[in-house]
Amino acid sequence: MSAEEFNELPPHLQATLALDQGHYLHHRIKGWCKIDLYWLHDFYVELWFLYDLKSIGLVRALTSNRQLEPYLETIRLKLKTQKKDR
């Protein structure tokens, strides 16, 4: 499964896959959300928990290195290199 295919799934299935099959890596706080970062298959997934820490407000697979920038100051992550067309 690719990150793009994951993002096409219904949110409840995305959350189930991330929690059951993903590997928890780190979290960060943004506003009223605790954002957990998981490694699933060959990509990173964020789960955005609302302030009550029981409700998931957003699940998304990260499809670019730029989306990982908030984590790079606190943990080391494998980043895919962009291939340039010749």
Image (cartoon, rainbow, N blue to C red):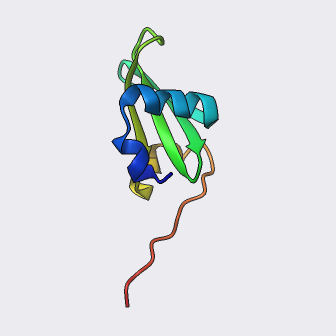
Residue in the foreground of this view, choosing between 61 and 74: 61
Q: At x 47% / y 11%, what residue is drawn?
A: 54
Residue 53 shows up from this direction: yes
**Residue 68 % position (x, y):** 46, 49
Q: At x 36% / y 32%, what residue is drawn?
A: 10
In the rendered image, which quarter is residue 59 located in?
Answer: top left
Residue in the foreground of this view, choosing between 83 and 66: 83
The answer to whether 41 is drawn above or below residue 65 in the figure is: above
Q: Quadrant of the C terminus?
A: bottom left
Residue 74 shows up from this direction: no
**Residue 28 % position (x, y):** 50, 30
Q: At x 40% / y 56%, what residue is drawn?
A: 64
Q: At x 59% / y 34%, what residue is drawn?
A: 26
Task: Please give left or right for residue 20 compared with residue 50 in the image.
Answer: right
**Residue 30 % position (x, y):** 39, 27
**Residue 66 % position (x, y):** 40, 55
The answer to whether 84 is drawn above or below residue 6 in the figure is: below
